[in-house]
Image (cartoon, grey):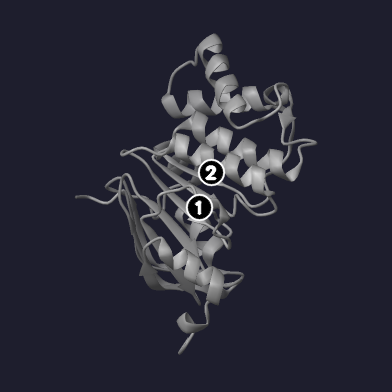
């Protein structure tokens, strides 16, 4: 079966420093993948390179998504094709409400006008499921939001835009236990047999309620080990020492 995402031998630099070093990764439809690794290993770099963030310079390798070579595609085209990325520190955008931002983004992705009332009903339903305050969808995007509210807003965006692949870069960082449970619920609401999730995390708390198919250990710019969901628990208990031997 054709993989939804294929990263083949990708190397990348940031400010002339090599971060990724011939990294390979495959993700299939219906799968949940976890990337873990020590600080500075290249986890967030991988996420940004998949989206072709111009700050990150790919020096070799190819990236394929849904059967298409997206190695040199522009960020907005990659997003339109069905890849969503949440950020460790979401941007604040004054003057643009959550509602208008998402309605416009949805229209761009679907290539048609979005019915105001149907969209509002769906957005309010998802916001309620994520335990967001009723007025949040009418407020400026992330402006004055707490850290937890910003992360919930990222999950709301994912549920609304319905990408084929959601990349969640430390969406759980800085969240209390209740907020982590809510974010996990949002991921469960999103997942189905036709999409996939790639979660970058340092913690196993967000994984406890999720069915995890693969855990990848990223060290020094390469995936050095892949296991099942139990690998995340081992990392939490013992760290990365055994995977760093010889690096």
The residue to which callout 2 is attached is 184
List x then y, in percent, for residue 230: 42, 64
**At numbered mark 1, what does the secondary structure look like: helix, strand or loop?**
loop
Q: Earlier in the sequence, mark 1 or mark 2?
A: 2
Whether residue 74 sits left or right of residue 25 in the image: it is right
Residue lying furthest top in this view? 117
**Answer yes or no: do the residues labelled 1 and 2 have beta carbons within 8 Å?**
yes
User: Is residue 74 shown above or below 95?
Assistant: below
Whether residue 194 sits left or right of residue 127 in the image: it is left
Residue that appears at 49% across and 23% down: 107
**At numbered mark 2, what does the secondary structure look like: helix, strand or loop?**
helix
Give the CA separation, mark 1 to mark 2.
Answer: 8 Å
User: Is residue 39 shown above or below 126?
Assistant: below
Residue that appears at 76% across and 41% down: 146
Q: Which mark is residue 208?
A: 1
User: Is residue 241 shown above or below 183?
Assistant: below
User: Is residue 133 shown above or below 2?
Assistant: above
């Amino acid at each position: 079966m054709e993989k939804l995402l294929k990263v083949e031998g990708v190397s990348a630099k940031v400010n002339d420093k090599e971060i990724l070093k011939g990294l390979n990764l495959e993700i299939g439809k219906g799968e949940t993948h976890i990337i873990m690794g020590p600080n500075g290993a290249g986890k967030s770099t991988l996420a940004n390179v998949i989206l072709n963030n111009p700050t990150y310079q790919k020096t070799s390798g190819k990236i394929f998504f849904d059967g298409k070579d997206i190695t040199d595609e522009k960020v907005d085209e990659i997003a339109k094709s069905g890849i969503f990325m949440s950020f460790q520190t979401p941007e604040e955008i004054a003057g643009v409400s959550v509602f208008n931002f998402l309605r416009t983004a949805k229209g761009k992705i679907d290539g048609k006008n979005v019915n105001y009332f149907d969209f509002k009903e769906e957005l309010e339903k998802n916001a309620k499921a994520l335990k967001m305050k009723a007025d949040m969808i009418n407020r400026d995007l992330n402006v004055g939001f707490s850290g937890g509210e910003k992360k919930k807003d990222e999950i709301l965006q994912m549920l609304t835009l319905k990408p084929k692949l959601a990349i969640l870069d430390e969406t759980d960082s800085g969240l209390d236990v209740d907020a982590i449970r809510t974010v996990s619920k949002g991921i469960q609401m999103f997942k189905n047999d036709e999409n996939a999730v790639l979660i970058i995390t340092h913690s196993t708390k967000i994984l406890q309620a999720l069915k995890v198919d693969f855990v990848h250990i990223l060290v020094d710019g390469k995936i050095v080990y892949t296991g099942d969901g139990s690998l995340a628990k081992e990392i939490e208990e013992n760290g990365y020492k055994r995977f760093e031997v010889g690096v």
